Amino acid sequence: MTRTEVTTGSEDSGPSGYAAARLRLLQQEARSGPPRRAALARLTDDWLTALFTTAAAETGMRGAALVAVGGYGRGELSPRSDLDLLLLHDGSADAPAVAALADRVWYPAWDLGLALDHSVRTPTEARKAAREDLKVQLGLLDARAVAGDLGLVAALRTEILADWRNQAHKRLPALDELCRERGERMGELQFLLEPDLKEARGGLRDATALRAVAASWVADAPREGLAEARRTLLDARDALHLTTGRSTDRLALQEQDQVAASLGLLDADALLRQVYEAARTVSYATDVTWREVERVLRARSARPRLRSLLGGPKAAPERTPLAEGVVEADGEVVLARTARPDKDPVLTLRAAAAAAESGLPLSRHLVRHLRDTAQPLPVPWPAEAREELVTLLGAGESTVAVWEALEAEGIVTRLLPDWERVHCRPQRNPVHTWTVDRHLVETAVRASFLTRRVGRPDLLLVAALLHDIGKGWPGDHSVAGEVIARDMAARIGFDKQDTGVVAALVRHHLLLVETATRRDLDDPATVRAVADAVGSASTLELLHALTEADALATGPAAWSSWRALLVTDLVKRVAALLAGEEPTEPEPLAPSAEQERLAVEALRTGEPVLALHTEQEPAPQDGEPGPVGVELHIALPDRPGVLPAAAGVLALHRLTVRSADLRAVELPTELGESAGLLVLSWRVAAEYGSLPQAARLRADLVRTLDGSLDIRARLAEREAAYPRRRGVKAPPPRVTVAPAGSRLATVIEVRAQDAPGLLHRIGRALEQSAVRVRSAHVSTLGANAVDAFYVTDPDGGPLVPERAAQVAGEVEKALG
């Protein structure tokens, strides 16, 4: 289609003609990306030119121009973009004439429902507004004449650019601060599940800021890949506008599949990965550019003082040796003059390790020079290369920036080819804060603070870097990761034994936390299974540290004092077994003094008795002890329906259940007979707010058991109001029998979307299946609940396999 086929000037310059031509243009599937944005800008130019020309003739207005600023000024109109317009006039006309001209341009746009960001100013007023408002000045840097007095616009552009360059020492730091504040508020685009393509760090706003820096002549952003990254983000925003029919920059979950399809991508994950890669390019360019701006401005401010003190030319920056072939110069890590990347294949890792250890950034020129000239490492790596990698990973927080610099130039995937599959890979579980690759680096950072706890810190750090390397491959990522980690560890140069340890750590990196939170630690089968998998005390030591580092690097929902205590307890039991202390089959536990007291009181009254106790964790070295949770004990006469009733009451009072233990107790009556009672011990935490009073819990439990409180109806009301993401459908629940989970009971594992009353519904289903619940282990990660129930038949033994499968099916059906 030629330009004349989409313009409206000769046939119909009115709103209806422009609207029809605009619609035709946006419906052309074959025309997208920069050509469509440019065509839409030209179409809009032609329509506004006709409006302005007619209005100027009707009002007799001279010395005025219509100016496109911002994105419209750059010719980057997305389907639902605002029109950023400035009506510029020389001040010779009176106010009513200027207002009349403006109305004849603004109102037709409003009539079409177009969003306008508009202003009316003289050149003097425009320059004043730019001096007072940085955002106005940024918009005017992209000013482009649409219609009218072109000389007036050209003069303003010259003045605005001159002002910007003359005031760069003040304006650029203000722009840097503006970008940082916005990034802290909106988050990093490259890690968000629902990113704002414009405002998040690494988005279109930052790309525009880099153009402004370049216009100042102080520094220029790295050009390589930046234009393509901007195009990717703009294309995604175009598709988002067309998919939603709205002016939005937030890539919401429910729209991602449609946006991906409109861009010809496989699915939402492919879309996010493409967007993340673009954002990472912009973020890296941003970091490099602002560092250069700071360096140049610092040098400019110091130069007059140096000249007055020294009376001569500027001295060369001091070069401080950091490692062989690596020096610090002007706050960055650069190559020594004698360095030979083409003869020294370890130089890349040596420079990276030196930068991380010293807390300095790698010079962009150094990274690109190494990318282009460094020789590949031999396989397996020499010992020095392996040691430098371990040093890099063990440097702590400064590792992240160095690793990102290497990854931005493709060096990481050259060193570790399997890294490509996890590069920018999104993680759909909201528990995760980072993409897979960044999570791996963050885990290594967390592990670096735990290296004093293990005998082989090198194996811990490398396992931390590789523990999720199997994500992106079919099947269980731990199983796939074991194979990949074995190959990578051998490539890095570990011997056969160390390679086996790294592979085992990757294979079992979820073992401790999953066992501790979902299995009965008093059951010898639980401890033996972990010991058999781990194999040695040294591997157990490493796995314990890796478990903590992984959880801390995942996000705040993945680790807590409660989980830490459970994992530590499990590790102690497994360590004892590996040391030769065989666990014995547990005898039926006698009730504690507290439980016995409650049972006696329940026997005396014939009604439920409750007690709440807050527990404290041991005080850390640098802080006060914190609450681990609340122990809730309930004793009552044995009767059907106790578990679902109690779980329902706790859900009604917004108490999150972390674990539950149910125990039958026999007590003598006054007549010399024995009476059966149930003692339930729960570990709970308030969902929010303060804990309810025990008296209120007891009253509601009594009402539930006698039928006067319809707990199912009350929880159904709560569940109906439970917030869910629009358009996101949770996967169906899955109930399975854990193989060889215990010799004392059958373990039924439930995985489902967490919701108020879930435990109540599970309890009802188990009650209706005529099984006894010995204990429950409840774990919630984000929106997912993973609960394990130790159940027996009425006689107290494990279920036969056929019956166990039947019970699991009945529970799954009840939850579906």
Image (cartoon, rainbow, N blue to C red):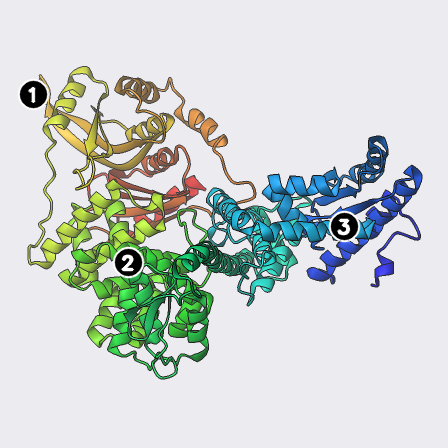
Q: Which residue is disc 2 drawn over?
A: 509
- Most extreme residue toward the bottom, as rendered? 343
Q: Secondary structure at mark 3?
A: helix
Q: Are marks 3 and 2 in contact (CB under 8 Å)?
A: no
Residue 815 seen in the figure: yes
Q: Which numbered disc, 1 or 3, marks the residue closer to the eye?
A: 3
Expressed as whole percent of the image width and height from the top left, the position of residue 72 reads 71, 50
Picture disc at residue 153: 3
Residue located 86% across and 44% down the image: 51
Residue 542 rendering spot, x and y as whole percentages: 20, 59
Quarter of the image with the N terminus is bottom right
Verify CB contact (< 8 Å) between mark 1 and mark 2: no
- Residue at mark 1: 672
Specify the quadrant that holds the C terminus. Answer: top left
Label 1 or label 3, whichever comes before in sequence order:
3
Amino acid type assigned to the residue bearing label 1 in the image: Gly
Towards the viewer: 41 or 293? 293
Q: Amino acid at mark 3?
A: Val
Depth check, front residue: 142 or 453: 142
Determine the CA span between mark 1 and mark 2. Answer: 54 Å
**In the figure, is residue 334 to the left or right of 272?**
left
Tell me the SS state at disc 1: loop
